[in-house]
Image: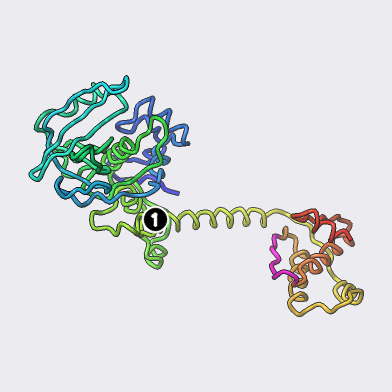
Amino acid sequence: MIVANEKREGGNASRDVLSRPVLQVRGVGPVMASHLAKKGISTVEDLLYLIPRGYEDRRTITPVAEALPGTKATIRASVVRSTLKRFRRRTVLDVVFRDESGAITATWLNGNPSRLRQTFASGDPFFLAGAVSLRGDAKIMIHPDVERIREKDADPVHAGKIVPLYSETEGLSGKRLRRVMAGLLEDHPEVLYTPLPADLCRRRNLVGLDEALRNIHFPPVDADFDEYNDRRSKAHRRLIFDEFFFSQLRIALKRADLLSEAGVEFRTDGDILETFSTILPFNLTGAQKRAVKEILADMARPRPMHRLLQGDVGSGKTVVSMIPMIVACRNGFQSAVMAPTEILAMQHYD
């Protein structure tokens, strides 16, 4: 459960930020919005809770000469040239990049190579991230994540950091989702807070919800990669706590509503427990007697009873449940026994 903060930079109210349609998010058009809708994402809040399925550590920038085939690497290099080739009735784009240590070729086999080629002007610097392999003696990357380095890009989205990996579907690439998420968080600084009491957050050592969501999508540069990838970070812990907390709160509120309703005030006086005990071929244990007395006390109240009887296998739960059923019968009501399997149902019947 998250709500929009009343204050933002400039003092504008932003209570409606989270309920805004994703079409109002920078970088999301009608086509992408339709793809997001298929994933159940229609509002800004839904988009914020599109939690990464994992992460990739791209903090280390590796020189081309040190990028080993068979490994993943993040490289900073400049465009040397680009060429289009026809191969088995498809157009292939090859872009050669070079840094001070050597050259590497990035290859794209799908999409629109002619249009993609326009992205790579000679001399432009880029980040490349992907798996390194060999084509003959030359190092290559096939379909790497690339990001042009601009002066205003003090904080790149796809390289130089722990990068979020999202579940991809048709029309929704991980790269595009990262770009949209980065824009969303940039456009709406400090819009989130939680109604959790501050004292509870301190006692549980919980980070703020705004900080948690931002760090889940874009972990700090100095973060422990394994903690994030295993979902053990403080950011993940905060979201997990919120989910359990509000789940329990909903149950408690529902229970309070149910307890406020009028129920049947059963007559439980008499010696039913003692009488029933005499016809059993064994004596009830102390724990069974305590459970029966608690149940009968609940039944005597004018509010509905909601009780779970727990016990090990063979501890005598069924015989305990028989006594309140007899009480219901003596008060003119029926009872029902539900069993999870046919065999168990037959055992109760017999």
What residue sits 27% from the left and 43% below the top? 131
Q: Is residue 44 left or right of residue 82?
A: right
* Magenta region includes residue 148: no
Question: Which image quadrant is residue 89 in?
Answer: top left
Question: Which image quadrant is residue 330 in?
Answer: bottom right
Q: Position of residue 158 (x, y in %)?
A: 25, 42
Q: Is residue 221 left or right of residue 217?
A: left
Residue at the front extreme?
136
**Mark 1 belongs to which amino acid?**
His
Q: Position of residue 236 (x, y in %)?
A: 39, 55
Residue 24 visible, this orientation: yes
Q: As displayed, is residue 243 above or below residue 96?
A: below
Q: Is residue 50 left or right of residue 131?
A: right
Callout 1: SS:
helix
Q: Which residue is labeled 1 in the image?
A: 236
Q: Position of residue 85 (x, y in %)?
A: 23, 23
Q: As displayed, is residue 320 above or below residue 60?
A: below
What residue sits 39% from the left and 34% below the top? 20
Q: As displayed, is residue 9 above or below residue 234?
A: above
Residue 10 visible, this orientation: no
For the record, the magenta segment spans 306-314
In the foreground, 72 or 287:
72
What residue sits 84% from the left and 61% below the top? 347
In the foreground, 192 or 98:
98
Question: Which image quadrant is residue 111 in?
Answer: top left
Magenta span: chief secondary structure = loop
Q: As displayed, is residue 305 above or below residue 161?
A: below
In the foreground, 112 or 278:
112
In the foreground, 3 or 345:
345
Q: Position of residue 254 (x, y in %)?
A: 61, 53
